[in-house]
Image (spheres, rainbow, N blue to C red):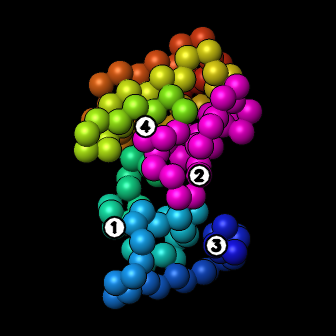
Amino acid sequence: QIGKLNEIENTKLLLNGNAQVLDPAPLSVCFISGFDRKDDAKLCPPERNALKILFDSAKGGEWTVNTDWGHPYKSHCSWHGVECNDDNKTAKLILSSNGLSGTLSPDIAKLSFLEFLDLSDNDIKGS
């Protein structure tokens, strides 16, 4: 099971040269330190990774609504509160009154096309 690979210390996942690799790669694969293509923006979209880090740091499992967040195969554009532009870049992130807590990850700065951010009425702090 791919989800368990990132729990194995020193795991190497080498897929370079495999034309049949689907994009994007399953989300958990992109967080395996030994994945040789984790920096490939097509396989591991930086925005999707940044949103997953936000989800984890803001205790996403406890959110009021977290539909599709972290889904291994669905686009981050389908995640609750995420609105994307025509290029599948995050343009809006609307998670007001949604039970966010914990810290706001600095990785949110990787959402370079973000035009609107609403995290109001939550209990989130800076990092």
What's the mark number on residue 61? none
Q: Nearer the viewer, mark 4 or mark 2?
A: 2
Task: Assign a secondary structure to mark 2.
Answer: loop
In this rendering, position of residue 15 left or right of residue 1: left
> Which kind of residue does numbered mark 2 sit on?
His
In this rendering, position of residue 17 left or right of residue 49: left
The magenta segment is 51-79
> Which kind of residue does numbered mark 1 sit on?
Asp
* Dot 4 and dot 3 residues touching (CB under 8 Å): no
Cα gap from disc 2 to disc 1, whole angstroms: 19 Å
Task: Assign a secondary structure to mark 3.
Answer: helix
For disc 1, the marked residue is: 40
Cα gap from disc 3 to disc 2, whole angstroms: 13 Å
For disc 2, the marked residue is: 71
Q: Position of residue 121 (x, y in %)?
A: 60, 11
Cα gap from disc 3 to disc 1, whole angstroms: 18 Å
Quadrant including the C terminus: top right
For disc 4, the marked residue is: 108
Q: How busy is the neighbourhood of tag 1: few (under 14 within 10 Å), some, or many (20 plus)? A: some
Q: Magenta includes 77? A: yes
For disc 3, the marked residue is: 2
Task: Assign a secondary structure to mark 4.
Answer: helix
Quarter of the view holding residue 20: bottom left
- Residue 17 higher or lower than 51, as above or below: below
Task: Assign a secondary structure to mark 1.
Answer: loop
> What residue is drawn where x is 53% and y is 64%?
26
Q: How busy is the neighbourhood of tag 2: few (under 14 within 10 Å), some, or many (20 plus)? A: some
Q: How busy is the neighbourhood of tag 3: few (under 14 within 10 Å), some, or many (20 plus)? A: few
Q: How busy is the neighbourhood of tag 4: few (under 14 within 10 Å), some, or many (20 plus)? A: some
Q: Position of residue 74 (x, y in %)?
A: 51, 52
